[in-house]
Image (cartoon, coloured by chain):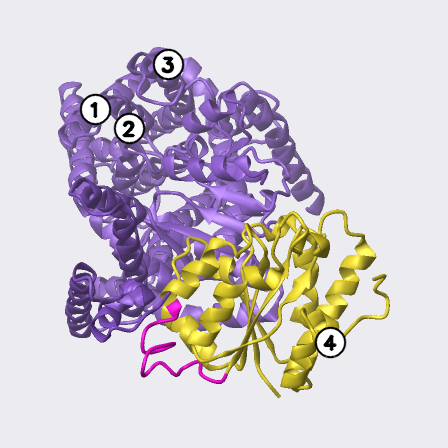
Amino acid sequence: MQQTFFFQAMIYLAAAVIMVPIAKRLGLGSVLGYLVAGIIIGPACLKFIGTEGQDIMHFAEFGVVMMLFVIGLELEPSRLWRMRKNIAGLGGLQVGLTSIVVAGLAILFQVGWKEAIALGMIVAMSSTAIVMQTLDEKGWLKTVAGQSSFAVLLFQDLAIIPMLALFPLLADHLPAGEAHGASHETLVSGLPAWIQAIVVLSSVAVVIVTGKYLLRPVFRLMAKTGMREMFTATALLLVVGIAVLMTSVGLSPALGAFVAGVVLANSEYRHELESSIDPFKGLLLGLFFISVGTSIDFPLIMSKPLTVLGLVTGFMVIKMAVLFGLGKTFEVRNAQNFIFSFGLCQIGEFAFVLLSFSAQQGVLTKETTDTMMAVVAISMALTPLVMMLNEKLILPGLCSMADGTEVQKVSDVEEEDNPVIIAGYGHFGNTIGRFLRANNVTATVLDNDSDNVDFLRRMGLKVYYGDATRYELLEIAGANKAQIIIIAISDEEKRLEMIETIKKHFPNLYILVRSTNRNDAYDLMNAGMMHIYRETFDTSLRVGIDALKLLGHRAHEATRSAKTFFIHDERTLKHLSSIRNEQEYVNAVREHIEELELIMQADRDATDIRSLGGWDRKAEVEEGVEKG
Amino acid sequence: MAKVLIQFAHPTLSKSSIQKTLETYCRKVKGVTFNDLYEYYPDLYIDVKREQKLLSQHDIIIFQHPFYWYSSPPILKQWQDLVLEYNWAYGPEGNALAGKQMLNAISCGGGREAYKETGYNRFPVTQFLLPFNQTAHLCKMEYLPPFVVHETYNMSEDMINSYGENYARVLQSLVNEEFQPIHYQDVEYINELTPVPSFSH
């Protein structure tokens, strides 16, 4: 028994270890590597793995649960709320329109209307695993296409719940198995609908409340033990626990994990959790892709190649067309729209669930489901190829993307031990870098804009590509040995993320941070920052000085006045940042404006002692005292 | 115990060995506050309130600086212009500094011989320092003989350290209030009151 287990594990791992690097080297992405590995070790080729590939696939689907947990961690509730239009609109329309079009065509091809509706819904699903993994690998998650894809996938996750409820109503054929398939037997299935609803809602509430109030003390306790594996175990327990809870009340475990992730997105343990779950997520997803590869039923495909290939092409083209149209409506720009619609055109892993469920419920015939299983698997396997075609053939023509020929790595930083790290090398960062260089101070530069990195490298600068908010990247960039880190990236949220990571893991670094404006500076001060640089403040004052000069003011007096203003403003900023109460804040602002007016007034009258100091000679002259 | 405030002014300290040594030695003396003006006010924007507070808290004020063009680097002049306010430092109600003592601690490239009537600088150092002397007087302070290091170019490491030692002893004596007014009458430089044995001259 053990031997078979180890043998199987060895086969899977070996296949992955061999195929994935090859695929990556060829620029095909890891997903395709896993899929090909699965095909090779599966029944079609080397026959190491037989039909048990299916069971492994169910197990490996847990990788999707973990993936959604991690995605949730990166998505704060406020950002999720901002995406509501895309999730409901884009996602809802995609599922709705695709289902209707596919069902309509199926009816034209003489399929019964009930079966047609079921097929439509199944085909509407896309693969969260493949799409998110690929987008992440290419660093496109934060792009418009990435965000839109995610919104659609999230809606599909939600939609699967009513679909599972709807399928029994579509049953036309005699159930192939039991009325309730074993895998969908839940604790609440025997109860009346309203109790079911209450149970479902309260279990989601349990996840939210637990995440918000109970987990932080638990994680703090685990972190205190100082044993990393305990933290990992807790994180795993959390995700597995949620999956069990959700499955037992008939909800999608992926959705539950996502909710838990979102709830924890604001906690200080977010990055720890992410890095604990990440390796498991990656391996399980890999396993999942391999098992999709092994499950492709080649004999069936060979028996009716035209039907299968016709269906695959037909479904993918329909999905693509619907997505493209929606993308246009929702203002996804041209190149981004291609990424969006090509990326989501496959039929996803939820289709497997829905297909086996519909077979049990007697919605679809065994023949249909078998054919569809093959169609789904092939469409998933084709996705990386389709996306690559898009990247090589279509995008270069549109040329608003980074040169798509190059597969971007997560980071390419080498070990560095410069005293300064500059994160973000745009207009802001590169002035700092040039100035330091002019003073023979070497800096390690990180930037996550691949175009910029390419350009600067061509200019002969040592600039590295990577997301500077990642702990691993900072460590490799030499954060342990450096003295100063300059955060010059433009994204406010990323800056706060980075500060959190640095304070936790590299407390010895001086942090110098760019800020957008006053409000952003308050946030940074509340995050404990001492060295904050408002990006437009100094420049505005310089403009003010020149304006005064052009109006005939003496240059030195204008310059000193600006300095007085600067010091006063910095002090006000510190005071205001400590005030949280809103009314108190308004009063304080008013007070400071009055004070500022006073000071500026005093600056204008040449009698002000504060600004003139010993230069004030009025009193001396009046009293006839001689100095010098 | 007297409290000593050193108002230090050097725009390029990283390139000066004698002033760096003097700094190291004086920082070791207890009861001495070292106020690095160029470090606090790199753009010559002086915090008048802070400076006046510092002055109030000390009994002896030392202007330590290189002797540039027979005077101090510009920040000290700026400091005087802004900090020594009318009716604070001088004038009918300006008694904030009354009774305190003041002196210069300077390093000059030229030798002591050059600062003689027959030398190429024609006047003694104390004459060049007359503006400081009179400023102290107007502010009702007592002006003490300066601490002077001559021939700072090509000075041996040992010699530099001897001056450091010498300076530290002067400061220590000032803190301990060991000098009497009568002592000052006999010397041109305050250095001479606490000679260091290893001096070659």
Whole-number angstrom distance, CA of label 4 to CA of label 3: 112 Å
Q: Badge 1 local density, few (<14 within 10 Å), some, or many (20+)?
A: many
Residue at label 1?
A324
Q: How crowded is mark 3: few (under 14 residues within 10 Å), some or many (20 or more)?
A: few
Residue named by callout 3: A304
Marks 4 and 3 on same chain:
no
Say whether residue B152 is left or right of residue A67.
right
Percent across and percent down for residue A27 are 50, 20
Q: Do labels 4 and 2 share a chain?
A: no
Q: Does the magenta stretch include residue A411?
A: no
Q: Colour of chain A?
A: purple
Q: Is residue B94 magenta?
A: yes
Q: How crowded is mark 4: few (under 14 residues within 10 Å), some or many (20 or more)?
A: some
Q: Do the residues labelled 3 and 2 touch (CB within 8 Å)?
A: no
- Between residue A263 and residue A485, name the one nearer to us: A485
The hue of chain B in the figure is yellow
